[in-house]
Image (cartoon, coloured by chain):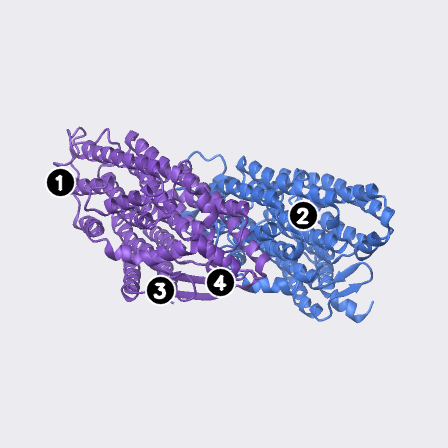
């Protein structure tokens, strides 16, 4: 391990150190604000370390990790998401009693897992990162131990994630058995050299890996856990599950496919095509039937991962760019949407019933405007980042002549409009104090949470109106892959 | 630069109107009115300044142009340009926009600032649609005008507003996405042929396409425009949206939003895909004729006054579709004329129904009657615009429909004959409006206040405009002519051949 290795790994080292620091802090004295402070500071320092690391890339550290501009871009994205979630969680947990400090420890560890994922170039580091992320999430989801819904969600996630990890592991074993290597870079080489490969074994291995990856991405038919976990988990944790966890997995999937040249496997591509189509259709259709905002967002995220898969399947020069842009837009939007849910929640329960949003525009106009902007971005309406993201994905899809996928994307978007507008309509409806089934919430609105939401909204508008700088950044970093 | 100002003034005026609301409900109204008047002055200035200029799309043919880089990754530019056709539409937009603000002066008492924000932003989107000559930018504005319109219907609309708003939004958005795919397809085909990625209208014109590809892409555009126009069978959102929208919303919908569909056909769908459009023309003209007759028939069957007027729009816009796809000089002139005249006459009818509803809270014709003796001014105005709607000679609508029919006659006699029947039907439903509302016995014992000076001023301006269009349409026709000619040149077979030989 040389000094240069340490420099490129510095973001990971900083986050790991921050988590140890939080651990020690809890051991010495429980103090919510300092735990939050250390976590936030850790995210900031790690973010700064990205720029230091950028001088030394691309660099492979052992055969396990490769830190290149692609990895750094997604690390930055994940760190920003982690930072945002920490701020939101601080406000969310602030009003609650009990032992709150470990949440930040787990959040740092989960972020570390994501960072490892986006930099991994080897099955071992892949699995290491994945498990670090998943095990942290088990606890984060069930963090409010007295809440039955959270516990249910946690157990559900535990069982299904463990099963999917087993699938992934078995798949990797099969691929390893056939190719004799676990490094992404050498797999492509082996594939071109060896001729007498047992394709069936390889395909079976890949299929099992798709199962494991599909679970993390929450695409149909591996999506069953999504609505329950989204609904049960505390809102900031849901934001993390929706963004960082999926984003890291998607970045890994892209890297794996490009570096091992898995695009050559038509059956796998067909499988992904079917997954994308069913995700877009089922996600949007199932969201129509929900009355719970968190569940609506859960199904919406399923559909959005379907859209992302269209970019992924397009391959070629635009695919990586489109996926990266879409992920940025998706991160901003989902964090904003769950940010609003978080800010509106009080100590008793999350603001997830549609009724909680009735007349929001007249009582809290700015929050309603922000939430409307986020929902319109999810629907892909101009002036928002989601629109440019969707345009990018469609351009990639049309460029590769994936007509079926493109048409399904359009149909899905049209269906999606209905449930996004439903929430908007409720927010703009007059607040009628009718027979309330759900007790009204008494949120506290911490200042930090509001600032974060304002920043996210500005980013949303910026990426939607003047996307050129972000596109240049993506071209300069992510596009170097493959 | 002036083009950019036109849009920016609208956007900024809307924001200002919203922010200034806390000072009092009059402020947003005056701000909106002031901003739109300023815009109208700018647009009229542009018109007078460039009266003599002929317009050929391309580097120098535009009256005014503005082109800034925007998203270089895709070769997308902030490219605005104006020729005679766009200019007429811009002036119409601002004229109708001012009337929409004036007519809402007393109707809207609730969240006045936000209302004017939405009105101004929908107008900004419409202006953008008429000015954009980059296809991405065009789509951007196309979608941008939907959101404020959606809120206008959903927040300030009538009884069944949520249903209408969502239906309107989903229809237009879904068809818009089809157009987006077509835009992308065209641009990428151009990219594969030339190696430059661009969404610029001028560059994409004359892209050689196989007949099948051209047809599919043309249909993508046609879907979006036919929904907006609306052409039967894609019209079902229209009666709901028009009926449920507040008066200003209906006026903007009928007067302007529908015109964006016609403008899109004229500017994009046909010139970009001339061969496909020629093949498709009989179908489109057929749809136009069906729209004329079916719209008129349904209009006749309505008892809700607002719904009736909404269906007359379907009928009148059928003439536009017929004229455009006849692709013949006179017919095109007629189509443009119809876009303007219909914008004014139908806008006025919606304003009248709105004024009536504001006073007596019903639009049901079965409960109305005998209003002439109580509100003679309203009756007179109503009679005038009903006459305009049925195509009385001397008014703008007559010139428009006559030109369309003369032009279409040279292309297809049977269709023209059928379309002419629409005029008869128009007479019936227009007279029915007058008869059921103003004549007969005053069953409900209505005694509303007559039109105020403010309302009379608005209607007076519209009456003058229609009479002017009817007696002296030359300035309008002269302004539109060079633009229409150049569109015809672009789409002519000879030009296409030349293009292919010397790309």
Q: Secondary structure at mark 3?
A: loop
Question: Which label belongs to residue B63?
Answer: 3
- Residue A3 in view here: yes
Identify residue for label 1: B376
Q: Is residue B136 visible?
A: no
Q: Earlier in the sequence, mark 3 or mark 4?
A: 3
Residue B133 lies left or right of residue A153; in this view the side is left
Query: Up-down: is B434 above or below B400?
Result: above
Chain displayed in purple = B
Q: Earlier in the sequence, mark 1 or mark 3?
A: 3
Drawn side of residue B442 relative to residue B155, left or right: left
Chain of residue at mark 2: A
Dot 4 corresponds to which residue?
B77
**Chain A shown in which color?**
blue
Q: Callout 2: few (<14), some (14-19), or many (20+) C-alpha neighbours within 10 Å? A: many
What distance separates the C-alpha of mark 2 from that of mark 3? 62 Å
């Amino acid at each position: 391990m040389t000094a240069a290795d340490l420099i490129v790994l510095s973001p990971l080292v900083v986050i790991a150190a921050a988590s140890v620091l939080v651990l020690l802090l809890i051991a010495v004295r429980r103090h919510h604000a300092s735990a939050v402070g250390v976590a936030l500071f850790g995210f900031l320092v790690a973010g700064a370390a990205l720029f230091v690391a950028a001088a030394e890339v691309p660099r492979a550290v052992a055969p396990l990790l490769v830190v290149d501009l692609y990895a750094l871009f997604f690390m930055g994205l994940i760190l920003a998401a982690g930072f945002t979630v920490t701020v939101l969680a601080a406000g969310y947990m602030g009003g609650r009693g009990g032992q709150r400090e470990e949440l930040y420890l787990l959040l740092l560890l989960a972020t570390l897992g994501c960072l490892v994922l986006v930099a991994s170039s080897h099955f071992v580091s892949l699995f290491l990162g994945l498990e670090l992320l998943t095990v942290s999430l088990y606890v984060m989801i069930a963090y409010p131990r007295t809440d039955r819904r959270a516990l249910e969600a946690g157990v559900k996630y535990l069982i299904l994630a463990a099963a999917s990890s087993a699938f992934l592991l078995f798949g990797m074993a099969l691929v390893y058995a056939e190719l004799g290597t676990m490094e992404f870079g050498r797999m492509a080489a082996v594939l071109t050299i060896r001729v007498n490969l047992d394709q069936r074994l390889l395909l079976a291995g890949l299929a099992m890996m798709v199962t494991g990856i599909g679970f993390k991405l929450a695409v149909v038919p591996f999506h069953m856990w999504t609505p329950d976990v989204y609904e049960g988990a505390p809102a900031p944790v849901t934001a993390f599950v929706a963004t960082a966890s999926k984003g890291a997995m998607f970045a890994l999937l892209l890297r794996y496919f490009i570096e091992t040249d898995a695009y050559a496997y038509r059956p796998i591509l067909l499988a992904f095509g079917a997954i994308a189509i069913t995700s877009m259709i089922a996600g949007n259709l199932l969201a129509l039937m929900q009355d719970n905002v968190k569940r609506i967002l859960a199904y919406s995220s399923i559909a959005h991962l379907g859209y992302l898969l269209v970019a992924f399947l397009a391959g070629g020069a635009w695919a990586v760019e489109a996926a990266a842009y879409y992920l940025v837009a998706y991160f901003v939007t989902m964090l904003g949407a769950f940010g609003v849910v978080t800010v509106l929640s009080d100590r008793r329960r999350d603001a997830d019933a549609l009724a909680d949003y009735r007349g929001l525009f007249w009582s809290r106009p700015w929050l309603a405007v922000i939430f409307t902007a986020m929902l319109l971005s999810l629907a892909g309406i101009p002036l928002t980042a989601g629109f440019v993201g969707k345009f990018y994905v469609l351009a990639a899809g049309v460029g590769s002549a994936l007509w079926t996928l493109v048409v399904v994307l359009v149909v899905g978007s049209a269906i999606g409009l209905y449930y996004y507008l439903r929430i908007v309509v409720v927010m703009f409806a007059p607040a009628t104090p009718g027979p309330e089934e759900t007790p009204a919430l008494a949120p506290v609105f911490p200042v930090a949470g509001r600032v974060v939401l304002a920043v996210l909204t500005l980013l949303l508008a910026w990426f939607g109106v003047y996307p050129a700088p972000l596109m240049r950044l993506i071209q300069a970093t992510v596009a170097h892959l493959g | 630069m002036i083009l950019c100002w036109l849009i920016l003034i609208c956007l900024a005026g809307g924001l200002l109107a919203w922010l200034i609301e806390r000072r009092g409900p009059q402020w947003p109204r005056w701000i909106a009115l002031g901003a739109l008047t300023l815009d109208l002055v700018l647009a009229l200035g542009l018109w007078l300044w460039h009266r003599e200029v002929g317009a050929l799309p391309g580097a120098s043919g535009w009256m005014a142009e503005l082109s800034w880089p925007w998203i270089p990754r895709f070769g997308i530019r902030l490219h605005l340009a104006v020729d005679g056709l766009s200019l007429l539409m811009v002036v119409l937009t601002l004229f109708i926009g001012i009337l929409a603000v004036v007519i809402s002066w007393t109707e809207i008492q609730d969240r006045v600032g936000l209302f004017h924000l939405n009105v101004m932003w929908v107008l900004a989107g419409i202006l953008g649609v008429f000015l954009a000559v980059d296809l991405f930018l065009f789509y951007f504005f196309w979608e941008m005008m939907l959101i404020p319109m959606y809120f206008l219907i959903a927040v300030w609309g009538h009884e069944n507003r949520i249903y209408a708003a969502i239906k309107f939004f989903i229809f237009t958005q879904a068809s818009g996405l089809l157009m987006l795919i077509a835009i992308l397809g065209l641009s990428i085909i151009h990219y594969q042929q030339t190696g430059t990625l661009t969404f610029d209208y001028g560059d994409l014109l004359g892209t050689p396409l196989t007949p099948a590809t051209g047809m599919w892409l043309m249909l993508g555009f046609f879907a979006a425009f036919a929904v907006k126009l609306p052409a039967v069978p894609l019209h079902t959102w229209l009666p709901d949206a028009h009926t449920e929208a507040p008066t200003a919303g209906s006026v903007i919908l009928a007067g302007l939003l529908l015109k964006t569909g016609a403008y899109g056909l004229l500017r994009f769908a046909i010139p970009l895909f001339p061969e496909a459009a020629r093949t498709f023309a009989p179908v489109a003209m057929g749809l136009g004729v069906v729209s004329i007759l079916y719209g008129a028939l349904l209009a006749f069957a309505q008892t809700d006054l607002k719904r009736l007027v909404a269906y007359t729009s379907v009928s009148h816009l059928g003439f536009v579709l017929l004229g455009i796809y006849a692709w013949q000089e006179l017919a095109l002139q007629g189509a443009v004329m119809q876009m303007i005249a219909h914008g004014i006459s139908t806008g006025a009818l919606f304003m009248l129904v709105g004024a009536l509803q504001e006073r007596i809270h019903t639009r049901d014709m079965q409960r109305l009657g005998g209003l002439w003796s109580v509100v003679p001014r309203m009756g007179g105005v109503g009679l005038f615009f009903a006459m305009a709607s049925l195509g009385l000679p001397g008014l703008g609508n007559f010139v428009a429909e006559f030109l369309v029919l003369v032009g279409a006659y040279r292309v297809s006699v049977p269709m023209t004959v059928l379309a002419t029947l629409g005029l008869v039907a128009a007479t019936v439903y227009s007279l029915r409006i007058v008869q059921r509302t103003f004549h007969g016995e005053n069953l409900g014992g209505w005694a509303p206040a007559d039109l105020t000076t403010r309302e009379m001023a608005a209607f007076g301006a519209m009456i003058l405009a229609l009479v002017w269009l009817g007696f002296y349409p030359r300035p309008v026709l002269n302004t539109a002519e060079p633009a229409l000619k150049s569109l015809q040149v672009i789409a002519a077979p000879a030009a296409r051949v030349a293009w292919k030989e010397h790309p």
